[in-house]
Every structure is written in C-alpha cells, then in structure tokens.
Image (spheres, rainbow, N blue to C red):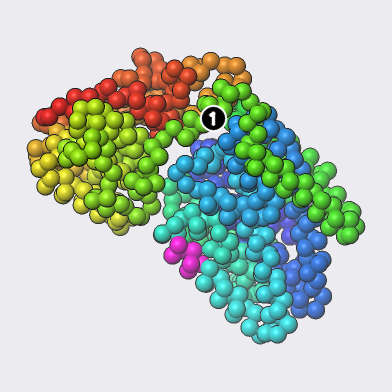
Amino acid sequence: MKYRADIDGLRAVAVIPVVLFHVSTPGFGGGYVGVDVFFVISGFLITSMIGAEARDHRFSILRFYERRIRRIFPAYFAMAAAVTLVAWFVVTPIDFKKFGQSLVASSCFGSNMVFWLQDGYFDAPAHLKPLLHTWSLAVEEQFYVVFPLILVGLFRWARPWVGAVVLGLFATSLAACIFVTKRDASMAFYLAPLRGWELLLGSLLALDVVPPITSRVVREIAAAAGLAAIVGSVVGFSSTTEFPGYHALFPCIGAALVIHVGRGVAVGRVLETWSLVFIGRISYSLYLWHWPVMVLAVYFVGGVLDAWTLVVVVCSTVVVSVVSWRFIEQPFRHQFPSRGWLFVGAAMANGLVIGAGVFIWRSSGVPSRVSDEVNVLDHARDDFNKDRPRCHAQDEKPIAYADKCVYGKPGVAPSIVIWGDSFAPELALVLGREAAAHDRAMIYISYSNCPPSIGLFGDARPACDRHNADVLAKLVAARSIETVILVARYEAFYRASGDGFFSTFERVVRDLAEGHKQVIVTYPIPRPPAYVPMMLARYQQRGRALTEAFIERRDYERENGPVIAFLDRLTTLPNVRGVRPADRLCDRERCAVAAAGRALYYDNVHLSLAGAELVIPLFRDAFTSP
C-alpha cells in the first residue's frame, strides 16, 4: 500500500484529543473517541496489507507477526520497564499489587479483560492505574490473532464472499455492541468482540466494499462531514455519554469518511501538513507514554495535578515520545535485528516483564517498601461496610425491599430506615450500632446511582425508578416505620438533571412527611480533591503532615450551593429536618479528610466508617420517637 500522509495526520487528530481529555482540558470532554478513530485506521491499514498479500498468495503469518512485534513490542517494553521502576518508589502497596497484575495482563495482551473485571465499586479509580490505556492494545492484538486467519482463509476458499462475510461480522459486532452497552457499558467498552466492528469498518474500506466516490464536490463534503463528526464527538460527548453503543458510530464513520476520500480534498491537504503528520508518526509512542506519566505524577504529588503540573506532564510526555519514536520505534521497524533475534529477544523481554509483574502481584505490592504507617493508611480503602455485596444494589439489579439489611437490636421491629444511593452503606452500619445502643432496629436500603426520587430517570434507568416507587409505597404504608433518613450524592444528580432532580426528590420527602414519618435529610458530604487513602499514604511516605490534605470549604459550598439552598427550603416543611455532615467535618475554612490518623474517606467521594463515625452524633435524636 502506498504511503498516505493524510492518515498520519488523522492519527494526530485521534491522539491529541485523547491526551487533552486525560488532562481534563475544557472542550475535550469526548476526547476518548480518539481511540475509536485509531481502531478504524488500524483496521484499514492492516486489512489493506493482508488483502494485497493474500490476493497474490504471498501472505505469511510469520511475517505478519514479525511486523506486529516490530511495531508494538519495543516501545511497549521500554515503557513497561520505566513505569515499573518509577512505580516501585511512588505507588502505594495495594495499587502496586494491582499494577503487577495489569503488567502481566498487558504483556499477554489481556489487560482489557483484567480492567473489565476490575471495573467495580471497590476498585481504585481509573486515574490510579498506570497501564489502563493498554486495554486498547489488547483489543487490537486479540483481533489480529483471529482476523488475519479468517481473511486469508476467505481469500483462499471463498474469495467472492470476502466482502459479504466481513460485512456480516461488522454488522454482528455492531449490533452486539449497541445491545450490550444498554446493559453493561463496561463490557461493551473493553471486550474485543464488541469493539471489533470499529476495526472491521476500516477493513470494509480496505476491501473496497464501500464504493468509491467520484464526484469532487461529494468527496469534499464527505471529508468535511467526517472530520466534523470526529470533532463534534470530541466536543459534544462527555464521561456521562452512553458509550460505546451507537454513539461510537459518529467518530468511527467520521474516520471512515476521511480515510475513504481524504486524498486530494481540502481536509486531506490539511491533514498532510508537516505538524500533523509528525504528531501522527509519534502517535503510538505519545499514546503509550502519556497516560503512565500522568498517573505517576498523581502518585508523586499525592493528589490532584494543578494546571502548571499538567502542562509539565504534557510537555514531558511529548519529549519522551519523540525520543521513544526516534531511538526505539524507528530502529526496530527498519529490520533491526534479524527476524530470528527479534522473536528470541521479544520472548525474553516479555518473560522478564511478566516475571516482574508476577513478583509484584504475588508479593501483594511489596509492602516492605514502605513504613507500617503508610500501609495502614493505604488500607483505609478497606474501611467500608462489608455488607455492601449482600445488601447494596448495583447495576440494574435492585435488591427487593423485603431482603434489605436490618441493623440494630435483634428481635426488635425496625422503626427507622436509611434510604439512599452509595452514600448510605457506611452511615447505615454505624447508625445500626447506635440503634442497638438505644434498643432500636433499622432497615438499610441503598442502590448505586439511584437517589431517593420518583421519576428521575424514565427510560434511561427504569429499574431505579421502579425500585424507588416500590420503596416509597411500602415505607408510607408501614405504620411501624417512624423515621426515614435520606442520603445521596445530590450535586451529581443536579448536574445531570438540573431542577428536575429537585422536584423528584421533593416528591419523596413530601410523601413521607405527609405519611406521618419523621424525615431526616442528610446534606451534601464534602467531596475530596483526590483518592484519599492514596493521598494520605503518599503524604505519610513523604513526611508531610496529614492535616495538609484537606478540602477547601469554599469549594464545597460553591459546588453544592444550589443543593444547599434547595435543602434549606425543603427542611422547613413539617416533619422534615436536615443534618449537615459539614458541621462535623469542616471548620470555617477547611474540611478534613483525616482525623486522629485515620482516613475519613475510603475513596475519592465516599465516607469511610471512620468518617461515618465522626458525623453520627448529628443523627442521635433520630433514635427518639417523633
């Protein structure tokens, strides 16, 4: 295939939004779609190469994988070695153990599976996983284990049907992706069979299944529309967009249009400019290095990266990427060393990386690297309600009201209920101890991302709305229930739904109050700027006082201003009162994330049991009858 500079330019259009999205640049909320553009490009280029060789019966699977090794492995090994070395000194033990696991998985091109399986409530957030970005490499390599064999087999035994079969595979993968995204977006995001359609879209172009466009005007319009679809996705999508699903069609079709008609049109000439072509050429190294550099910087500072630090991170990444491209990628791509030594060297290097990963993983992150105090703070992420798996509902599988957990004195009919989203479980456990001390019992009802509201989600999350309607009806009808405590991450739902959240939440409060229940509304809980156990462990490791980690009270009040104003009005209703966790967590200027050497949060948003214990005195009058 003849070299196309416009495709290198398109690579730049793909990688720049990914990097800027990861450093939280305004206007790049959908920058993650750059990976989808990469998939389409990869499918087109690889299929063009395989197809040309298969047509002439020249295809060699050995030569194919030699090219893949030269393209992927050298820079990957350099990155893996450098990241492992730095992580040894800055990553805390629990996360270092998971890093070891991901190092093994990524070296076996299975990290997409690991990150999918880890995508749960108690796993560290994405920005603490240095190898998270290797999921896309795993998807590609898994695809290229199977697809070349299928394609070569088709060319040999069913040549007239090549295009039809690939089109069928594309349609099947796309339909499955859209279907699964509605039910398990994480599965659809990470698994190769559900992302394969994006690579197959590029394959369809390479196999000439898509007819050529001969009209110059239509070509210009198509290329411009394709670029607009990519840019529109970058600007218009966000982390809340249901993805991949049908939304992924926009950047993928956009990339396909640009590839299909990019030569000889205005968009193509723009993409062929020197600056974009150069960024495109270093795009693999840039993608490979940018994420671990940023994650390790987060660990190094022990928290959020400010704007200037992010600038340094981006500039450092560009420098490292240029060096990686020039002195690692280029020499190995140009027949150095010989094929035999290449396979032997790759196997040995991969064995060393896998061995290092197994050691780190099996030694639980080598906790002897740090002090006992650091290990204690690192394990604060385990300071949550262990009844969550049994009692707390997630995904689209709410737990029936009758099966909810009961805390407090055994044999006593529950008279108190705590009802909320994922903010409820830790408060529930500690409140349950308080209830037992007062010879009372309480019911605990919680459902992730499902605040106590009626009709908030509609068709988007019918299970949540049905769950809430059922709970509300049963609470109002239950004469034994005297007090209902409500808690949720209000500001997140307000950001997503605006005043619509307020009206749906108010309906619940009014129905409960008018049903003669005492309603206690928990005000917003301050949100930390970083993952608290990691932040405190790193502060301890660097000899900094834990009190140096805190939340600015003005930031808390600014973030939650509309919610606080709404709750102030709501708590003037009869039978309704409010509890303000900030009264215990904050002084006039700062809100604490640690007290008495313990972390008050087990992640970057939820109170730990230690944090719940600190605010429980505010709820004590709930245990006296209204």
Give the left or right position of residue 219, taking residue 355 as reference. Answer: left
Residue carrying label 1: 378
Residue 462, given in percent of the width and then of the height, sits at 29, 56
Magenta segment boundaries in residue numbering:
174-180
Residue 494, given in percent of the width and then of the height, sits at 32, 39
Residue 77, given in percent of the width and then of the height, sits at 76, 46
| Residue 176: in magenta span | yes
Could one spot residue 600 in this view of the protein? yes
Q: What kind of secondary structure does the magenta stretch mostly adopt?
A: helix
Seen at 79% across and 73% down, the residue is: 59
Instruction: Tell me the quarter of the image containing the N terminus.
Output: bottom right
Seen at 81% across and 53% down, the residue is: 346
Give the left or right position of residue 262, taking residue 186 as reference. Answer: right
Seen at 32% across and 37% down, the residue is: 424
- In the image, residue 94 above or below residue 392: above
Residue 481 figure quarter: top left
